[in-house]
Amino acid sequence: QVQLVESGGGLVQAGGSLRLSCVASGSILSINLMGWYRQPPGKQRELVATITSGGTTNYADSVKGRFTISRDNAKNTVYLQMDSLKPEDTAVYYCNAEILSSTWYRGHYWGQGTQVTVSS
């Protein structure tokens, strides 16, 4: 059983910062791509940022220069440092990871989501 658990969401004023964490646990052989997605109220889920096991990153244009994704492969953890937050960043943030499990199944797994609310 593979599980992703996010933490670090909350309420912050515009211009503030938050750091999200996501830990993958269970019968994991390897983790390839890890990333963060978000779903604003009334909208579809969208990509925020991804990072490969080698550290190559990709960002949505709306967060470039403000958000930083990183990972600790030894801890099966991915982070999202969010600075200069704007009200439009308000959303439920989801962690996603491409994982090869001990049953040799490779699939994409999702966390339960963490709420980020930015007040103006």
Image (cartoon, rainbow, N blue to C red):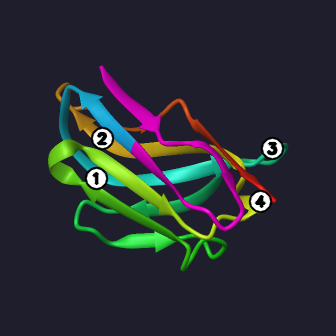
Amino acid type, mark 3: Pro
The residue labelled by disc 2 is 99
Residue drawn at 45 percent across, 37 percent down: 6
**In front of the other: 30 or 3:** 3
The residue labelled by disc 4 is 87
Foreground tag (3 vs 1): 3
Amino acid type, mark 4: Pro
Instruction: Tell me, yes or no, whether the two marked residues, 4 and 3, touch with CB atoms within 8 Å.
Output: no
Between marks 1 and 4, how big is the CA–CA gap?
32 Å
**Closer to the N terminus: mark 4 or mark 3?**
3
In this rendering, would 73 be left or right of 56? Answer: left
Name the image quarter holding the N terminus.
top left
Between marks 3 and 1, how big is the CA–CA gap?
29 Å
Between marks 1 and 2, how big is the CA–CA gap?
6 Å
**Closer to the N terminus: mark 4 or mark 2?**
4
Residue 115 placement (x, y as % from top left): 63, 39
Foreground tag (4 vs 3): 4
Residue 110 visible in this rendered orientation of the protein:
no
Which residues make up the magenta segment? 1-21
Residue 90 placement (x, y as % from top left): 72, 51
Which element type, helix, strand or loop, lies under badge 4? Answer: helix
Between marks 2 and 3, how big is the CA–CA gap?
29 Å
Instruction: Tell me, yes or no, whether the two marked residues, 1 and 4, touch with CB atoms within 8 Å.
Output: no
Instruction: Tell me, yes or no, whether the two marked residues, 2 and 3, touch with CB atoms within 8 Å.
Output: no
Amino acid type, mark 1: Asn
Label placed on residue 32 = 1
The residue labelled by disc 3 is 41
Res 69 quadrant in image:
bottom left
